[in-house]
Amino acid sequence: MNWLIKILTLSLACLMCRVYAHEVSPPPITTINYNAAIGGINPKQAYFISLLKLALENSRDQYGDYQLNAVMIEMNQGRALKMVADNNMIDVVWTMTSIEREQQLQAIYIPLLKGLMSYRIGLIRKNDHDKFQQMDLAQIKKTLIGQGADWPDVDILNSNGFNVVRGNDQHLIDMLLKGRFDYYPRSIHEPWRDLARYPDLVLEKKFLLKYPAPIYFFVRKDNAPLAQRIEYGLRKSIADGSFDQLFYHHPITKNMIEKSQLDKRIEITLHNPNLSKKTAALLDEKPMWLTLEPKHIPSS
């Protein structure tokens, strides 16, 4: 009988060791692949990567360690979205939302730029500066506007009566300089690098286009663990103030409101027909958004 008791005791001890080891073992490392430009991470990409790292750091307590990997491939938005959907090389992408994109992928419904993409100011050729200063709303609606071929902005601008010329997003500046179109709207944090690099471009100073255009992180539809982790980390970052700390002090967003001189511009408010009901409802959560007050005229 003693030998039986010893065997049972030893078996129970081994079982308890296995249970204990299982309970205290750390969760597996979360590996996340994202796309970066072949030439290296540019300042605009760096903001979103920093925000993704912040969310992952602030979710360590619930989800454990992580590893971020940059996949250096040059690709447009449409291809990046498809690669995430197909579970092909990259796991997360950040981009402006639309109904179609939210159907294709799982959005994390937190605006990464606090709605900054809603405010658009235009790059123009230097020689056209005086011409634009004399324009009214009807005239700027007739102006040829350049946008990326797969950007949701194309449908937004077209539906509001603007004339849009589509192009590869990497060639839009060259197209503007060559006269293929005359006005290139950019979010208020975006035009400054191009102005520094192209002396024949200037900032158009009269108008501001405004339409709701949040940027979200997107992951594959069936990648719920990553979506939950990123949302948890972002919400924790908002609550502890680290989200705003990054947003207001990052090189691409710091002082962009003052530089854009929004208080001297005429705001043209546009309707975005591509907003899902969930995104439209999110517009009422005021702490998530910037509130800027330039002069205002409706689009029609």
Image (tube, rainbow, N blue to C red):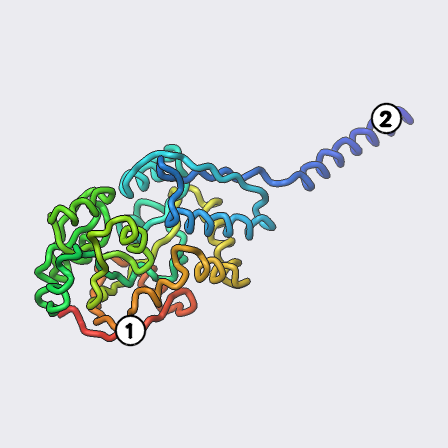
Q: Amino acid at mark 2?
A: Leu
Q: Nearer the viewer, residue 216 or 292?
A: 292
Above or below, 34 against 240 in this view is: above
Label 1 Cα crowd, 10 Å radius (few <14 / some 14-19 / many 20+): some
Q: Secondary structure at mark 2?
A: helix
Question: Is 32 on the left or on the right of 118, as rendered?
Answer: right
Label annotation for residue 263: 1
User: Which corner quadrant of the image does residue 4 belong to?
Assistant: top right
> In the rendered picture of this protein, how many numbered marks are placed on residues?
2
Question: Does any portion of residue 79 appear in the rendered image?
Answer: yes
Label annotation for residue 4: 2
Considering every residue shown, the one lying at the far front of the view is: 199
Dot 1 or dot 2, earlier in sequence: 2
Residue 20 percent across, percent down from the top left: 72, 39
Question: Is 230 on the left or on the right of 160, as rendered?
Answer: right
Above or below, 54 against 35 in this view is: below
Q: Nearer the viewer, residue 299 or 245?
A: 245
User: Which corner quadrant of the image does residue 70 belong to?
Assistant: top left
Above or below, 41 against 154 in this view is: above
Considering every residue shown, the one lying at the far top of the view is: 3
Q: Residue at x 58, y 37 (%)?
A: 28
Q: Residue at x 28, y 55 (%)?
A: 191
